[in-house]
Amino acid sequence: MVSLSSWSEQWEILLVALILVAAHLIAPRVKGLIKHPERQQALGGGLSVAYVFLHLIPSLDAADGVVGPRIYFIGLLGFVAFYGLDVMFQPPKHTHPTKYHAYLSTFFVYDGLLIFTLGLNLPPTPVLTLVFALSLALDVLNTDLEMQDEYGERFVKWGRWLLIAGVAIGYGLNLVRRPHPVVVDLLTAALAGFMIFHTNNGVFPVSRNKKFPWFLAGVLAFWVLHVLLGAVD
């Protein structure tokens, strides 16, 4: 018989999944409502940088005890692979299908892995889970807007639906079985390398363009959420 705590956990995971799906769905409509896209990009960049330093890097430290020091090599490979991909497809080849499909596949795995592994580290209360979900939704929305800027209708018409499918698949797998810690750690390391590159490549030119206060606001917003979720003593 399924316990009440297990049912509560599944409802919380479903809530996070639905909020992420909603972020993907509303992204095209939100884009036209943004009056100051540079501020939005800088704010989202602050959230992303804080996410990398306060969540992804500590995740690699925790994984070190299971996989060993090679976990950092996997993260480095993720960084180098996407750096090389970005260099290969500079303008006028920046919209090349190879780069587009690689980025889309990465965000697909990211969305799916996020929901698949959520049961391992849920916030202590449903209210904090909601706060956590909204923070993630802002990051997802920012990523979708960046993909729209670079790939246009191709991403709007079917790319974002693939990312929604990633959320759905992650939730379905979560219902079926628990993830193996080693597999999760290796995927997280590769994704951490990508996120560190993506953040440095896309955020700092925007932040240098007299938008530092908005970048700082993003960093502080994620840090406050991080403290509220009990991740920092």
Image: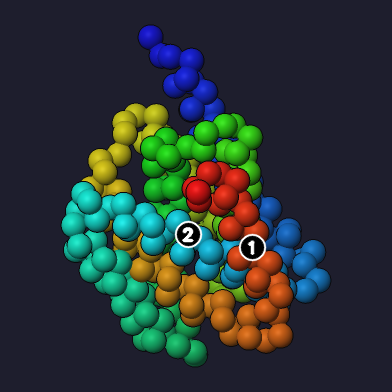
Q: Which residue is mark 1?
A: 220
User: Marks 2 and 1, Cα distance to the nearest angstrom?
Assistant: 12 Å
For marks 2 and 1 on the same chain, the one whose residue lies earlier in the sequence = 2
Toward the viewer: 79 or 57? 57
Q: Quadrant of residue 139?
A: bottom right
Q: Position of residue 98 (x, y in %)?
A: 38, 74
Residue 109 is at least partly visible in this image: yes
Q: Which residue is mark 2?
A: 54
Toward the viewer: 131 or 15? 131
* Residue at the image point whose x is 62% and y is 74% from the top: 149
The number of callouts visible is: 2
Toward the viewer: 71 or 114? 71
Of helix, strand and loop, which one carries label 1? helix
Q: Position of residue 204 (x, y in %)?
A: 56, 81
Q: Is residue 46 placed above or below 23 in the rendered structure?
A: below
> Mark 2: which amino acid?
Leu
> Crowdedness of circle 1 by 10 Å Cα count: few (<14), some, many (20+)?
some
Of helix, strand and loop, which one carries label 2? helix
User: Going by the image, does 133 lie left or right of 68?
Assistant: right
* Residue at the image point whose x is 26% and y is 43% from the top: 181
Q: Quadrant of residue 116?
A: top left
Name the quarter where the N terminus is drawn. Answer: top left
